Image (spheres, rainbow, N blue to C red):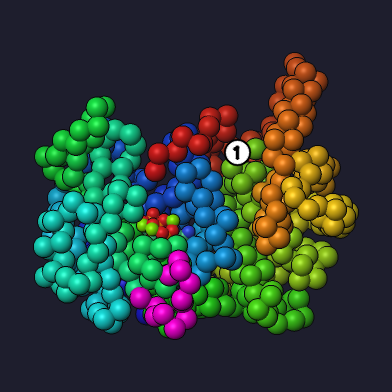
Amino acid sequence: MDIRKEYLEFFKNKGHDIVSSMPLVPDDPTLMFTNAGMVQFKDIFTGAIPKPENPKATSCQLCIRAGGKHNDLENVGYTARHHTLFEMLGNFSFGDYFKKDAIAYAWEFITVNLELPIDKLWVTIHESDDEAYELWQEHIDASRIKRFGDKDNFWSMGDTGACGPCSEIFYDQGEEDFNSEEDCLGGEGDRFLEIWNLVFMQYDRQKDGTLVPLPKPSIDTGMGLERVIAIKEGVLNNFDSSNFQPIIKKIEELAGKTANKETIGSYRVIADHLRATSFMLSQGILFGNEGRPYVSRRILRRAVRHGYLLGFRKPFLAKVYDTLVEILGSHYTDLKSQADYIKEQLTLEEERFFKTIDLGMSIFNEELAKTTDVFSGAIAFKLYDTYGFPLDLTEDMLRDKNLKVDNAKFDELMLEQKTKAKAAWKGSGDAATEGDFKTLLEKYGKNTFVGYEKTFENSVI
Ligand code: ATP
Ligand code: MG
Ligand code: MG
Ligand code: MG
């Protein structure tokens, strides 16, 4: 079953317009990347722009959660369900249908179209949402509806404005395979797999915190395609599904070995990171030292480091890329039409890091052998500055050793260097970034270049 198509057609038949995925770089300086299907409709929800003629829309949105408020980078390879880049299916009502229909549609889709067994489904609602509790009971036994607080089941766009309770659908993958303490409903484990979040935008939060009911409440939903594919294929980990397996197999073939318990994480990280960086390149995000290009660089260098662990000593991702195109190229045609360019850029960036990774790794290992408590901030800075190891990469390498970097020292050295650099660059223009900027301009015109100087940490979504 082509679940993406099935979903969009399902909602089209319910009167929704199919809207295409918006760019990964939103036209919104407070947001690092598009991280949910609702981002392109934000201004409609807030009322800043008028509603479209058809107040019902559906989409399959490419999302990145690797920066800003939503950051799943540290989860990749450690959980069975998180990716840096993923596809979010969504249906939206702009003051049209509300809770009753949103719940009924979601239930119909997962039980009739997807044929998920009802006895494995669970639902969470906001503790205050008696209306949702009543409505869900038309579909599912009350014992399977659980109430949670604001942290899990209340959504807001910002400190003020549209907000409301949400309701999430979970799929129980069974305690046999998942039995850690985290594997409870609402826990961080993978047993109860969250598949779909239905947001009921029904309040307008005032400056003083009071919730004023919206005259025309709205619906925003999001369901992770990779998770649904995995469930449908009966595998317990997204990376074991047909979306990722061919990529992992290809990496195994190139590495000349098969994944085992110790190494499987590396294959998964590489597969995930290849997807994210390739899509970013396909949308004009190059590798660089600041802002979004630096996020891309950090992701790629993590992939290279895992490749290094598997024995790669020179660029290999371009050889894996064609497998990615086989999986996603027919829907995301840019991956196909820009294949040569993307492979070239991947290879160039890999080459840059492969040049220094050997020395960097030996410096890292030397220091590690001496470390008992905290990893030296000075060495972490040297790795960053001279060998191109982003700080989060060094931190990641220390993660399974339960060690942390002396961040205060690192920050101090970073600040020192920035101050020096500023003094040295005074009056010399910004030639370093000019090249990248020109390429972007030629390719995508003026609108897609978003200033990187703004802080993304204020991201509200
Ligand atoms: P989780 O609790 O598993 O981290 P979430 O609550 O952060 O998920 P939402 O913000 O509710 O996720 O997004 C809607 C849906 O998008 C989720 O129900 C899930 O199916 C999917 N999703 C969210 N984050 C990811 C990710 N990093 N990789 C793949 N799918 C994701
Ligand atoms: Mg999350
Ligand atoms: Mg969640
Ligand atoms: Mg959620």
For this view, does 209 lie left or right of residue 28?
Answer: left
For this view, does 101 lie left or right of residue 358?
Answer: left
* Residue shown at the point (36%, 45%) measured from the top left: 40
Q: Which residues fall within the magenta stretch?
A: 172-183
Residue 251 in the image, given as x and y percentages of width and height: 69, 74
Q: Amino acid at mark 1?
A: Gly
Please determine whether, in this image, residue 385 is positioned above or below residue 247. Answer: above
Q: Is residue 138 visible?
A: yes
What is the number of callouts on the image? 1
- Mark 1 surroundings within 10 Å by alpha-carbon count, few (fewer than 14), some (14 through 19), many (20 or more): some
Hey, which quadrant is residue 428 in on the image? Answer: top right
Q: Is residue 338 visible?
A: no
In front here: 394 or 150? 150
For this view, does 103 lie left or right of residue 66?
Answer: left
Residue that lies at the very extreme toward the front in this rendered image: 372
In front here: 334 or 213? 213
